[in-house]
């Protein structure tokens, strides 16, 4: 959904079906809104840092431009709101990356380095402990299914943009992060890529020619997001 006009007391909202919603409607299985989610993709929180809580919050409410309704679920609500029981919480956890990654880039080659291991860890600033209701036990991982797969995992969904979505549960007995959150190690495996496919999707940057794609990891309890680049040579 997206706001068309909120300049008066009559708020006009544009609501459209996502690709999944259209699929269900086409199957004539009945259409009922059972759940909804709220997001703050458009909000610029620098307004609060710059103008203070009162004036900054007012500027967010009055001048924030709301995106139009999007039919592509991968583009809509990348940053969803989460419910937190602690009213005094002032910091949210983030996701840090380690393993076969440097400067937020994973490098894979078609003939030699076909697997990259990446560890996602929950972190929080100033040595605080992550609240229990924000500890991520399941992570949502999105990769381009034309080129990559998560080793040993089965995708939960595919979309028309060739994005594969995995919901990966952190195994029992695995290590926790220093902040009391969870860690998850994933192996991203390169799929066989023909020379013609590589030529179609690759680009030359300087003296290097490679395919550039992105991997997105979201903690389903905390809402924290880590996105990094995969370069395929």
Image (spheres, rainbow, N blue to C red):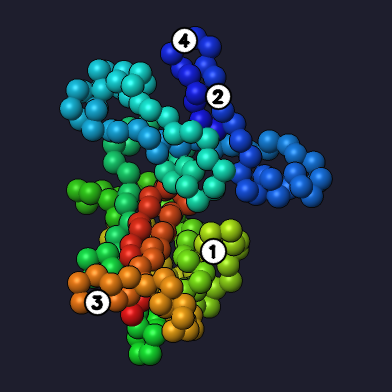
Measured in 3D between alpha carbons, the distance from the residue under mark 1 to the one under mark 2, in whole angstroms, is 30 Å
| Element under disc 2 | strand
Considering depth in this image, is 83 or 141 the residue closer to the camera?
141
Mark 4 neighbour class, 10 Å CA radius: few under 14, some 14 to 19, many 20 or more: few
| Element under disc 4 | loop
In this rendering, the label closer to the viewer, 3 or 1: 3
Measuring 80% from the left and 41% from the top, which residue is drawn there?
A: 30
**Which residue is label 2 attached to?**
13
**Which residue is label 1 attached to?**
162
Would you say the residues marked 3 and 1 are in contact, meaning their CB atoms lie under 8 Å apart?
Answer: no
What percent of the width, then of the height, locates residue 169?
52, 64
- Camera sees residue 22: yes
Mark 2 neighbour class, 10 Å CA radius: few under 14, some 14 to 19, many 20 or more: some
Measured in 3D between alpha carbons, the distance from the residue under mark 4 to the one under mark 3, in whole angstroms, is 54 Å
Residue farthest along the bottom direction in this orientation: 111
What percent of the width, then of the height, locates residue 227?
35, 58
């Amino acid at each position: 959904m997206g706001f068309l006009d909120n300049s008066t007391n009559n708020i006009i909202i544009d609501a459209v079906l996502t690709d999944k919603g259209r699929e269900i409607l086409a199957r004539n299985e009945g259409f009922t809104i059972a759940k909804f989610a709220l997001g703050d993709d458009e909000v610029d929180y620098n307004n609060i840092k710059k103008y203070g809580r009162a004036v900054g919050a007012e500027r967010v409410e009055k001048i924030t431009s709301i995106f139009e309704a999007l039919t592509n679920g991968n583009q809509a609500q990348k940053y969803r709101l989460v419910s937190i029981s602690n009213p005094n919480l002032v910091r949210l956890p983030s996701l840090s990356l380690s393993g076969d990654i440097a400067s937020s880039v994973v490098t894979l080659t078609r003939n030699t380095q076909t697997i990259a291991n990446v560890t996602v860890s929950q972190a929080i600033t100033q040595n605080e402990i992550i609240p229990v209701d924000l500890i991520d036990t399941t992570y949502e991982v999105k990769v381009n299914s034309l080129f990559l797969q998560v080793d040993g995992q089965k995708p939960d969904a595919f979309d028309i943009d060739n994005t594969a979505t995995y919901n990966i549960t952190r195994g029992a007995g695995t290590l926790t992060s220093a902040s009391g959150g969870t860690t998850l190690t994933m192996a991203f495996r390169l799929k066989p890529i023909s020379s013609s496919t590589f030529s179609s999707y690759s680009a030359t940057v300087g003296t290097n020619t490679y395919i550039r794609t992105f991997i997105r990891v979201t903690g389903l309890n905390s809402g924290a997001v880590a996105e990094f680049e995969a370069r395929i040579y």
